[in-house]
Amino acid sequence: MDKSLDSSNPKPGTGPLRPRFILASMPKTLSIVIITLNEAANLPRTLASVQGMGEIVVVDSGSTDATPEIARLAGARVFTEPWKGFGAQKNSAIRHAAGDWILSLDADEEVSPQLALEMQRLFAGEPPYSAYRIPRLNHFLGQPLKHGGYWPDPKLRLFRPGAARFEERPVHETTQTSGPVGQLRGHLIHRCYATLEEYIDHMNRYSTLGAEMLAASGRAPRSLPSFLWNALLNPAATFVYNYVCRLGFLDGRAGLLQHLNHSAYIHWKFVKAWRLGRRA
């Protein structure tokens, strides 16, 4: 593995990405699948982290920035498709993959060098499982969150074609599989929410989608006790549990802001669901 290669983010039109590391040829082919929408700020890091690991498939849903160009410069196969929801979009990207194995990434995630080497060793033989969970190290305001329930945050992202698929729901999609699942030690790096404004905007959108899911399933709070619990007591209890009992305070100011705003997100979601329920 050559660690001396330049890992700086390229600017659109300045030439191909230089990988942070290159793996030796793996005996089993790998497809890295990514869905995108206006991810020019994040995508170069993600693509640099997987250069040399296999084919890259990007399904874009109409970016107005340089996202498609950045992906093509990295050698990715780029498809443009209308937005169908997170789960359905990721399943569509999986269908474009041609490898023996699939690694599903978000556009703001990176493969760590430790994970890349572990995958190389895994594929040197015959993997005992058809799907693997990968721990994910989340970053908030540029700082890794190692407490409060945010680590190891395992995600089922590596699997054989047909062994797993994403639940088709508007938000918080999970990966479904029917067989036993292995666990890797190397981790993904999730560089989410570089600014507090970005996080608040993101949680506002997600709370709307979550409220719509609650209302559609008939779980929107309707009575006063239900509203008080879900919109007021539940957010407060979640903050105490994650920040105090799960040691979120050890992540400093970033941890405090993360857990405060996550509790606010829960409040927003149930207030919006309550309003939707009243309208219904």
Image: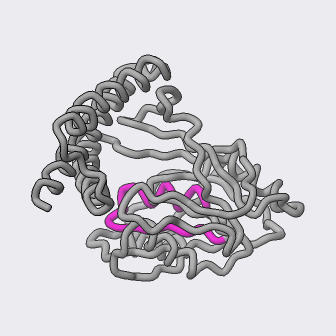
Q: Position of residue 76 (x, y in %)?
A: 53, 75
Q: Judge whether 116 appears above or below 95 on screen.
A: above
The one of 126 and 218 positioned closer to us in this rendering: 218
Residue 115 part of the magenta-drawn span: no
At 24% from the left and 44% from the top, the residue drawn is: 270
The one of 8 and 239 positioned closer to us in this rendering: 239
Rendering quarter of residue 234: top left
Farthest residue to the left: give it. 279
Can residue 172 be seen here? The reply is yes
Q: Is residue 5 left or right of residue 117?
A: left
Rendering quarter of residue 69: bottom left
Q: Position of residue 66 (x, y in %)?
A: 33, 70
Q: Which residues are magenta?
A: 31-50
Residue 37 part of the magenta-drawn span: yes
The one of 56 and 176 positioned closer to us in this rendering: 176
Q: Judge whether 189 appears above or below 90 on screen.
A: above
At 50% from the left and 32% from the top, the residue drawn is: 149
Q: Is residue 9 left or right of residue 52?
A: left
Can residue 14 be seen here? The reply is no
Q: Is residue 122 left or right of residue 42?
A: right
Q: Judge whether 112 appears above or below 280 on screen.
A: above
Q: Is residue 77 left or right of residue 195?
A: right
Q: Position of residue 89 (x, y in %)?
A: 44, 73
Q: Position of residue 80 (x, y in %)?
A: 39, 82
At 13% from the left and 51% from the top, the residue drawn is: 275
Quadrant (top left, top right, bottom left, bottom right) of the C terminus:
bottom left
